[in-house]
Structures are given as structure tokens and as C-alpha cells.
Image (spheres, rainbow, N blue to C red):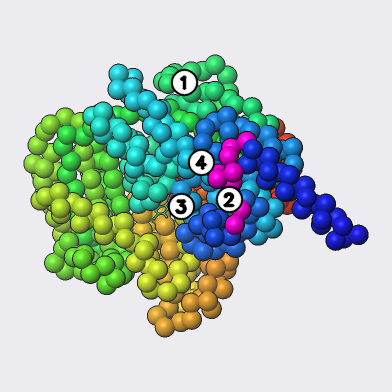
Amino acid sequence: LVSLQRFILSIHMLDFINALAAAIGPSHVLTSPEAMRSHLVEPRGLFHARALAVVKPGNTEEVAAVVRLARQYHVPIVPQGGNTGLVGGGVPDDSGQAIVLSLTRMNRVRHVDADNDALTVEAGATLASVQEAARAANRLFPLSLASEGSCTIGGNIATNAGGTAVLSYGNMRDLVLGLEVVLADGRIWNGLRCLRKDNSGYALKHLFIGSEGTLGIVTTAALRLFPRPQSVETFWAGVSSPDQALALFRHLRAHFGSLLTAAELLPQTGLDMVLTHFPQTRAPLPAPHMWHILFEVSSPMRMDLRDILATVLEEALEKNLLENGVIAQSLAQREAFWLLREAMSEAQKHEGGSIKHDISVPISALPEMIRAGCEAALNVMPGCRPVPFGHVGDGNLHFNISQPIGMDKALFLKHWDVMNAAIHALVAELGGSAAAEHGVGRLKADIMRTLKQPQDVDMMRAIKNAFDPEGLLNPGTILSRES
Ligand SMILES: Cc1cc2nc3c(=O)[nH]c(=O)nc-3n(C[C@H](O)[C@H](O)[C@H](O)COP(=O)(O)OP(=O)(O)OC[C@H]3O[C@@H](n4cnc5c(N)ncnc54)[C@H](O)[C@@H]3O)c2cc1C
């Protein structure tokens, strides 16, 4: 009986695959393991994913047709963009019953409207291509991530991506004017308006932003553009402690306001890893410092920002807000500073296992988070090497813990849950978030139940049921199946 049931099921699924092929063309429905492979691995290699097929529709109507068919055959859908997400939300589980719906064929920038400072783009366009289209129209699209060459606008929206310019321009949520979304029942919602003000009821677009593919499939977006900066200065400071880094940040923020566009904190331990594993890099300052902070100030006006910055920094030195510092003298030096920051995660890979936390706390609580977090990590695993770094101006740290030198990697990674619990307990105590910018995905779906209030989970479940009553959109992401 079991084998008869299996046979009927496989015939049913074969019908489904054939129907998909008829709807979007056979060459856009991948079923062989080799063709699907790159869609089933994620950057951290934490999940073993399998799929019935990877489907690549070419336009919104085809996305809608795929969703309708998946509904008819009751097949779960995992939307996928560039597959650079770090929490396992863009890949299916290992049941092999879901399809991956890849948006990468929908990659056109449809319209750049410089008069309205707006740009309309399909969800599968890479972030880098959107930045480039804005630049060509003498505008800025400010979202900036190390993965920008591969991540897509749809993925950026679905994860409410952050990055290095949040301090001045906000998260992706602040950069979206309107959306077109295919709903779970296969209807197309056209919310592609470029309005700055619209209080005509619930802000529906915001439900889709940060929903990680669980409420609908983003197919097109209207995005905000900004004037291009005409003056940019980059500054690297060595400081003795996170307290001093924060004091320096406050000093710069008080002088530059929203012209302070980036503030990135790095520990000397992390910088040493970058300098060791990236031979082309150089330490920006002659001597080591316990901590480093990378600042950028920029203005849409042509002005002598460097002179102003030098004066502000002289004052900071007099007030003992830094130990040493250097302003980048050329574009090449600016890029060299940024490479040190961007290589931080990659460098840790060369040091063996790394247990990750993507946390945020109120900015004033950052020094305590770092002090107590390092202590907690060392209690869990003596000899481990905490490397907390990140967007200090947003209170967002990638609190990564590298394994003790010489320890077996697999053995170290077995401490993932207990290390997470120790760090997340502190985050909760300090009023922070354990999913600051990468989202929840499948990686953190279970722990969200313990870290969120029951009221949060109830409201989220109610929204999910209203948008996707059959639970076919990215099941197991954000809300674990049990919650
Ligand atoms: C080197 C590196 C650096 C990174 N730096 C940052 C950083 O600074 N800040 C930051 O926020 N993130 C960062 N990330 C994480 C990642 O790049 C972002 O989360 C990015 O926004 C994901 O885009 P993607 O197209 O790759 O989405 P995917 O990884 O394909 O998917 C991510 C999630 O979005 C959903 N999704 C994708 N497309 C759609 C769509 N069209 N409609 C509905 N749901 C969709 C997926 O189902 C999944 O849940 C980094 C990643 C790497 C590898």
C-alpha cells in the first residue's frame, strides 16, 4: 500500500512539474541535482537542502502562474534571490517536497525617474546593478552591503537589509516607496506607487518588507533615490575601548549630524585576522590599538569636508576621545580602509569555526554588551576568541566567536546553541534584538519563540494565517512549525 501511495504521489508531482514547464517553459524548470545545486547551498553551509525543482519565471504573470500551480498541487514555495542570506531562509528543508522560486531572471531596471528621485526595478536585479543605474542618472541608491554584487533587491526587501549606510539613510524599509507582490493565492497586488505620503489605511508594503518570503513574493519595487555625494571623507581611528569609540562617535555625530554616513567598529583581534589572511592589506595606523573605528562623512554639496573633519578631530584628540587616527588621502586609501572592514567575516573563516550572533542593543549599552558578551563567551569556552564588530552607529554588532587556536572545528561548533543562549540572554537583559539585520530565517525560528513575547508570536501567526492560510510560502522561516 505504501509503495502504491508513493507511486501515485510521484505521478502527481510529475504532473505538477509538467504543468510548471508548460507555464514558464521547460528550460526554466530545473530538476537535475547538478542544475539545482547552487540554489540548495547557502553561504554558511549550515543547512542540507533538497527540492522538487528550481523554477525561474521571467515575469510577474509567470510568478503568479507558478504560485497558483503550487497551490493547486499543495507544494511549498521557497522564494530565492541571490541566495546570500545568512539565516537559511532562502533554501528549503531536506524533505525535497518544496520548489525554489528563483527571481534571478527578473532583473531589469524598468525606469529611473530622476525628477521624482525614484527607480522601478524587478526583484531579481542585483543591488550593485541598482546602485549603478542610480549613478548613471546622477543619483545615489544608498543601500550598501558586502554581498551587493550577488544579492537582489527582492532579497534586500524580504530581509529588510541594513549594511553600512543605515546611520544616515535607514534600512531597506526606509528606501522602498512601493511594491508589486504576488500573493499566496496567485493574485498580483500592485502597490507600486512612488508616493512620499500615503496614509490611506494599513501600510501593507511594510508587512512584506522583512517578511522573508513568508507573506508574498516581491516581483517589482519602486525605490527612493538621493542626491549623489559630492564630498566624501573617510577616517580611521585607533581607540582604547568601546567606551572611547562611542565617545568619539558621539562627538562626530554632534558635529556632522546626518552627514556622518558610516561608523564601523573593529577589534584588533579581527584586524589581525584580516592582515594575516589578506596579504594585500595593511594596518592603517603604525601601532596596534585595542579597538578601531572607521568613519565616513559625506555631503551632496561640494565643500571642504576634510578641513572641517581635521578641526573636529583635533578637538577630539584634545578631549582624549581617540589614541590615533588618519584621514584617507586618496580614493585608493579609502578603498583600502573599507576592505579591512569588508574582509572581517571572510578572515574569520580562515581561523576555523566561528559561532555567529547578529545582535543589536541600544547604542549606549554597546560597551556593556561587548564586555559582558566576551566574558560570557570565555566562560562557555575558555580560549575562544570573540570578534565583535559592526555598525556601531546602529547599535548592531556581529558578535562572532572564533574557536580556540588548535581546537577541532566540529567540536567547537557543537557549542553553537549554548554559546547562542549565553549571548542572547545578555541581549535580552539589555533590551536588544537577537536578529538585528540578517533576519530570522530557519536558523533562528526556534529561538524566536523564547526571545519574543507570546503576544508578538500570536500577532505574527495571525498575520501569516491571513496572508497565507495554507502555509505554503516559505514554511519554517520566521515562525517555526510549532509556534
Ligand atoms: C558577504 C556578505 C555580507 C553581508 N552583509 C550584510 C549586511 O551588511 N547587511 C545585511 O542586512 N545583510 C547582509 N548580508 C546578508 C544578505 O546579503 C542579505 O540578507 C540580502 O538582503 C539577501 O538578498 P538575496 O537576494 O541574496 O536573498 P536570498 O538569500 O536569496 O533570500 C533571503 C530571504 O529573502 C527571501 N526572498 C528573496 N527574494 C525574495 C522575493 N523576491 N520575494 C519574497 N521573498 C524573497 C528568501 O525566501 C529568504 O527568506 C550579507 C551576506 C553576505 C554573504
Q: Give the left or right position of residue 319, taking residue 345 as reference.
A: left
Residue to which mark 2 is pinned: 30
* Residue under the point 68% across and 34% down: 68
| Distance CA(mark 3)–CA(mark 2) | 20 Å
Q: Give the left or right position of residue 194, taking residue 322 as reference.
A: right
Q: Secondary structure at mark 3?
A: loop
Reply above or below: 430 against 118.
below
Mark 3 crowd level (few <14, some 14–19, many ≥20, 10 Å Cα): many
Closer to the observer: label 3 or label 2?
Answer: 2
Residue to which mark 3 is pinned: 84
Sooner in the amino-acid sequence: mark 3 or mark 2: 2
Q: Secondary structure at mark 4?
A: loop
* Residue under the point 29% across and 29% down: 226
* Residue under the point 40% across and 80% down: 405
Residue to which mark 1 is pinned: 193
| Distance CA(mark 4)–CA(mark 1) | 21 Å
| Distance CA(mark 1)–CA(mark 2) | 34 Å
Looking at this view, is 43 or 300 the one in front?
A: 43
Q: Secondary structure at mark 1?
A: loop
Mark 4 vs ligand 1: CB under 8 Å?
yes
Q: Quadrant of the N terminus?
A: bottom right
Residue stretch in magenta: 23-32
| Residue 448 position in % (x across, y down) | 61, 51
* Residue under the point 34% across and 42% down: 128
Sooner in the amino-acid sequence: mark 3 or mark 4: 3
